[in-house]
Amino acid sequence: MIWRNFVSLLAATFLGFVLAGCDVDVKDPGKAPDVDVQTEPGRMPDVDVQTPDVDVHTEERQMTVPDVDVQTEERTVTVPDVDINVPDEDNDADAP
């Protein structure tokens, strides 16, 4: 359980650094084509939807369930160490 939480935290941290550490320089923003359409405007279809009635409720039932006692201890474990080098904003001077 602790290992799963640690891996989730590490993945979220790494993803945050990757997304925040990007330096994107747009050289050509591109252009959408010009389109001239002479026709009648479109319309949405007329739809009548009948959905089922759903009745959600709870009830109590007698079941046999396990009784679990969890013991924890503190240990030293090897974990990944991630270093991320973010590019400088002045790197675009080297671009052609």
Image (cartoon, grey):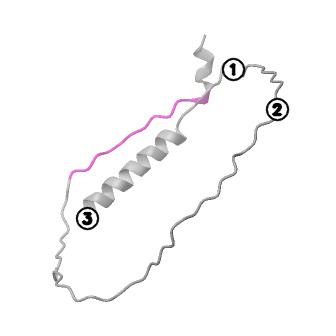
- Quadrant of res 56: bottom left
Disc 2 versus disc 1: distance between alpha carbons? 30 Å
| Residue for badge 1 | 30
The magenta span reads 78-89
Secondary-structure class at tag 2: loop
Q: How many marks?
A: 3
Residue that mark 3 sits on: 1
State the residue in front, 64 or 84: 64
Residue 6 falls left or right of residue 69: right
The quarter of the rendered structure image containing the N terminus is bottom left
Membership of 24 in magenta stretch: no
Q: Which residue is mark 2?
A: 40
- In this rendered view, identify the residue nearer to me: 42 or 70: 42
- In primary-sequence order, the first of circles 3 and 2 is 3
Looking at the rendering, which quadrant does residue 14 occupy?
top left
In the drawing, does residue 7 fall left or right of residue 52?
left
Quadrant where the C terminus is found in the figure: top right
